[in-house]
């Protein structure tokens, strides 16, 4: 009977591997084609059938990119904005999630319902009110306009609250008995044990900010303050003539921080979102 089940499972396993293989190829091919196109000349990029192996034009495409736009400045701008918003989002979301999970105060349910309500609002709806606020504060075309609206997110508060619901109250009480204040309990006991959740939220936040295009397009007009997606769009619009080789090089360079982030912290993505916290 066991042999029959095992014999029946083999075809299903083969079909599953075929589907997984096809899915992996479909997912990875655009990335591979981008890497290959960054090394080709303009005519080779649009050759039919498409060329599958790298060429030798990467240095020329990189030189053309550096002549066209200050891509390193845009890269540093994106790193600065994404890093600051990631750190503040993780810290403030963890503090808010800890308060919602472990403290009973008046209006807690209402405030948490408001936080959940912000998750239902599309970003496009908030663009005009946010722009008016930035205009009144005099922050248009500044780094503050890029950073302040994303200092903390409803998703971050919700995620950290759910993770901290399972944190043992006994550990918190023991830390209080040892003489720690509430901030001491949070920074010395709670936060060090929530590394997986913090890392997962940090990865999601960094990726979201790295690819954010609409909001920087609305509030930033000075080329020296462009983020990387804005720099890419300005490269496309130059003079009506598009050079796809430099664009592909810029796309490859823009992928590097995300690929490094994924390889170093990939284990936290699943464990941080679907598990991670200590259980009583």
Image (cartoon, rainbow, N blue to C red):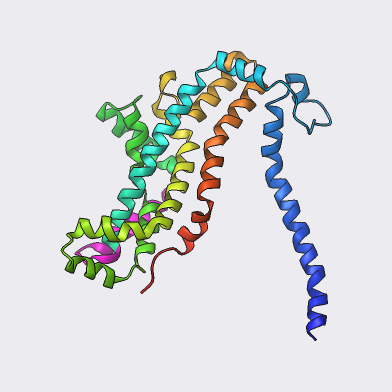
Quarter of the figure with residue 278: bottom left
In this rendered view, identify the residue nearer to me: 79 or 170: 170
* Count of numbered marks: 0
Q: Is residue 143 above or below residue 270?
A: above
Left-right relation of 107 to 230: left
Q: Main secondary structure of the magenta part?
A: helix
| 231 relative to 152 in the view: left or right | right
Give the residue drawn at x 77%, y 67%: 13
Q: Is residue 162 magenta?
A: no
Q: In what quadrant of the picture does the N terminus appear?
A: bottom right
What is the magenta range? 101-122
Q: Quadrant of residue 85?
A: top left
Q: Is residue 43 left or right of residue 180?
A: right
Residue 153 in percent (x, y) is at 37, 48
User: For residue 103: magenta?
Assistant: yes
Kindly identify the residue that appears in the image at 51 percent across and 24 percent down.
231
Q: Residue at x 50, y 54 (%)?
A: 269
**Residue 171's quadrant in the figure?**
bottom left
State the image coordinates of residue 10 (x, y, percent, origin top left).
80, 70
Q: Residue 109 at what x, y percent from top left?
A: 28, 64
Q: Relative to 122, does residue 105 appear above or below in the rendering?
A: below
């Amino acid at each position: 009977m066991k042999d029959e089940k095992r014999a029946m499972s083999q075809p299903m396993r083969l079909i599953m591997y075929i589907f997984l293989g096809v899915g992996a190829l479909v997912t990875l091919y655009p990335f591979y084609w981008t890497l290959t196109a960054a090394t080709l000349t303009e005519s080779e990029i649009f050759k039919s059938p498409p060329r599958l192996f790298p060429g030798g034009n990467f240095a020329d495409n990189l030189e053309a990119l550096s002549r066209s736009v200050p891509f390193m400045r845009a890269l540093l701008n994106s790193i600065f904005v994404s890093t600051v918003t990631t750190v503040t989002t993780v810290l403030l979301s963890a503090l808010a999630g800890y308060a919602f999970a472990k403290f009973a105060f008046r209006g807690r349910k209402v405030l948490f319902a408001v936080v959940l309500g912000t998750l239902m609002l599309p970003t496009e709806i908030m663009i005009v009110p946010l722009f008016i606020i930035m205009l009144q504060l005099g922050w248009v075309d500044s780094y503050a306009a890029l950073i302040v609206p994303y200092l903390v997110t409803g998703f971050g508060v919700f995620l950290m609250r759910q993770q901290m619901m399972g944190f043992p109250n006994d550990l918190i009480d023991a830390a209080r008995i040892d003489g720690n204040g509430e901030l001491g309990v949070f920074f010395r006991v709670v936060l060090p044990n929530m590394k997986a959740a913090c890392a997962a939220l940090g990865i999601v936040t960094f990726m979201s900010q790295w690819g954010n295009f609409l909001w920087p397009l609305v509030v930033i007009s000075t080329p020296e303050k462009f983020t990387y997606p804005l720099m890419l769009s300005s490269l496309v619009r130059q003079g009506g003539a598009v050079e796809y080789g430099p664009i592909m090089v810029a796309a490859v360079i823009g992928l590097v921080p995300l690929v490094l982030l994924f390889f170093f912290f990939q284990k936290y993505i699943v464990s941080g979102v679907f598990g991670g916290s200590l259980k009583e």
